[in-house]
Image (cartoon, rainbow, N blue to C red):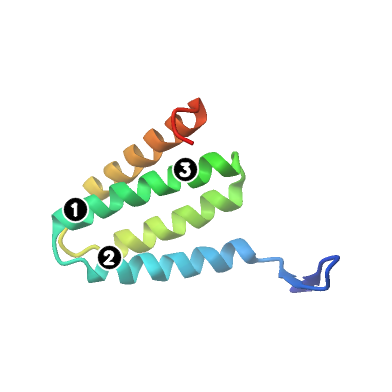
Amino acid sequence: MIFMFNKKGVWLSENWAEFFFFCLLVFGFLFSLSLQSAGLSYVMIVLFGLMCGRFLAQRKKRFPFYLIVFGFFVGFLLGARFASWKVLAFFFFVGGALSFYLHERGYLG
């Protein structure tokens, strides 16, 4: 059974995490294709890393949310033309870890 109904009668897909994974993979790919310089790619990946760290800090270690963030990350790396994928990965994980740590400690709202 692919679709279920909740108590309010609205259908929920059993594969919602995979759907958002794919959507963010495509979005990340198209977004990174639109960036025309390596410097701008590095700035944007740090900002997205910070945003993802906050997102994951709010969701408290649930696997589907890590899958969704990974979809964006892979899409962004696949579309990056001018930047090194190793540097992008480093900046993304540093930004995400920094944001996650600061939100978990309560330094950021």
Q: Which residue is mark 1?
A: 84
Amino acid type, residue under disc 1 in the picture: Ser
Q: Residue at x 48, y 70 (%)?
A: 23
Q: Residues within 10 Å of mark 3 (few under 14, many from 20)?
A: many
Q: Residue 24, percent across and down?
A: 45, 65
Q: Which residue is mark 3?
A: 54
On screen, 40 above or below 6? above
Q: Residues within 10 Å of mark 2 (few under 14, many from 20)?
A: many
**Label 1, residues with CA under 10 Å away: few <14, some 14-19, many ≥20:** few
Q: Is residue 71 above or below residue 57?
A: below
Q: Indicate which label's residue lies in the foreground, 3 or 2.
A: 3
The residue at 13%/61% (across/down) is: 37
Disc 2 residue type? Ser
Q: Tell me the mark number nearer the camera, choosing from 2 and 1.
A: 2
Q: Is residue 94 left or right of residue 20?
A: left
Q: Residue at x 65, y 66 (%)?
A: 15
